[in-house]
Image (cartoon, rainbow, N blue to C red):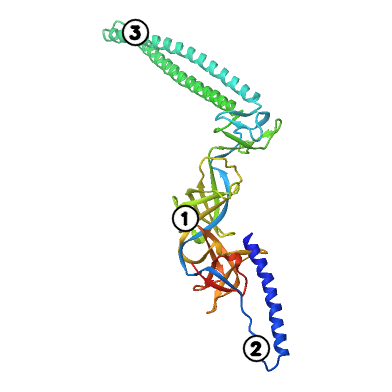
Amino acid sequence: MKGVMGMAGYGMRAAAAVILSAAVWAAGCGRSGQEPVTVSRTAVKGVEVITVRPEPRETPVETVGTVRAKTTAAVAPQMMGRLTAVLVAEGTRVPAGGLMATIDDQAVRAQLASAGGAVAEAEAARSEVDKAIGQAEAGMDLAEKTYERYRKLLAEKVVTRQEYDEVLARRTVAVKEHERAIEKRAQVTGRIAQAKGQADAARTMLAYARVTAPFSGVVLEKRADAGSMAVPGVPLFVLEDPRRHRLEAAVPEAYLPVLKVGTPVRVVLDEAPDRAFSAAVTEVVPAIDPGTRTFLVKVDLPPGNERTGQFGRLRFKAGKGTVLAVPKSAITRAAGTEGVFTVEGRDNVARLTVITTGAEFGDRVEVLSGLSAGTRVAVAPVDRLSDGVVVETGK
C-alpha cells in the first residue's frame, strides 16, 4: 500500500513540478534583462541510502514437474475369455491379492476334468503293469531255475538235447516278457506325468480366470466392463500405491552434470506454494529428449497428501555467482511495475528508476536489470520520496 501511495504521490508531485517549471520559464521571459529565478527543491531528511554492490550467491534453478505414484501397475489378464464380473471401480482400494475381475472358466474346468480323468486312467494302467511285472518276474525266476537243473542233467546225459533246448527257450521268453513289462511300466509312467502336467496347466489357467491385485493400492483406471473380452497383455485396470509418491521433473540438459543421485533439492507443490520442503534426487534418467533438450529427474516425496498428477516445482543450486540485490523495503510498486529511488549527483536528487526483479532470498531481492554496481539506492522511508526531491541522509 505504501508503495502504491508513493507512486501516486510521485505522479502528483511530478505534475506539479512540470507546471512549476513552466511558470518559472514564463516569468523569466516576461522579465527580460532581470536576474533569473531559482526554484528550490523539496528536501526529505533522514533517508537511509545504500550502495548496490555485487553479492556472492548460489545460482538457483527452478523447473516444473508432475507428481506420480512411485509404484504403478497396468493389471492385464493372462488368459483370453469373456469377463463374467468386474468387482472394482475407479477409486476402489484393493488389498494385495484382492479379486478385481473374473473370466469365464467353463472351458478350463472341462480341460481340468479331462486331465484328471487321464491321470486316473494312467494310474490304473500302471497298477495292471505292476501286476504283469510281478508275474513276469515269477515266470523268469522259474524258468531260470528249470534251466539250471536241465543244464546239469544234460551234462549227466539224463535228458536229451531237445528237452534242454526247450527249457532254454522258455527261459529266454520269460526274460523278454519281463523286459516288455518293464518298458510298459515306463510308458505308463510317462502317460501319468503327461496327464498330471495337463492337470497342473488346467489348474493354472483356472487361477488365471481370477484377475487379482499385484499389490495393495487404489484403482486409477477401469478399462473394461462385464461382458467384454479379456485379452492377454491388454490392461483392464491401472493400479497405484497411494502411500509413496515422487516428483518427476524435466530439467534442461545443461544441468545434467549438476544433478546426481543424492543431490539435495527443494520441492514446492502447487497445493502449498508457500511451503517448500527438502528432498534428494533418487533417480536420474541420463537420456536427453531430442525434442525438449531435457532429461528426467525423479525425487521421492515424504508421505503426505500428494496426489498423482499434481503440479510441482523442483529447485536446486547450480553453482556460485554474483548478483545485484536490494532490500525489499527499497522497492515501490505501481501499475504492474517495480522501481527504486536512486540517489544521484552531489545534490542527492532522488530519481525513480524502473527495475526488473528476480528471486528473493531473505529480506533481499535480486535485481536483473535497471541498476548497475555502485548505484546508490534509497531504502527508507520510500513512501516519503518522489522523483526530483533532494535526499538528506541520516541515521
The residue that label 1 is drawn on is 259
The residue that label 2 is drawn on is 36
Q: Nearer the viewer, mark 2 or mark 3?
A: 2
Among the two numbered marks 2 and 1 on one chain, the one whose residue lies closer to the N terminus: 2
Front residue of this view, candidates 240 and 324: 324
Among the 4 quarters of the image, the one containing residue 370: bottom right
Front residue of this view, candidates 361 and 143: 361
Tell me the amino acid under the disc marked 1: Leu
The numbered disc on residue 146 is 3
Alpha carbon separation for disc pair 1 and 3: 92 Å
Q: Residue at x 71, y 86 (%)?
A: 27
Q: Is residue 101 left or right of residue 45?
A: right
Looking at this rendering, what residue extends furthest in the top direction?
158
Tell me the amino acid under the disc marked 2: Pro
Q: Residue at x 55, y 62 (%)?
A: 329
Discs 2, 3 touching: Cβ within 8 Å: no
Tell me the amino acid under the disc marked 3: Thr
Would you place residue 331 above or below residue 389 in this image? above
The location of residue 43, given as percent across then percent down, is 58, 73
Would you place residue 371 above or below residue 244 in this image? below
Alpha carbon separation for disc pair 2 and 3: 160 Å
Among the two numbered marks 1 and 3 on one chain, the one whose residue lies closer to the N terminus: 3
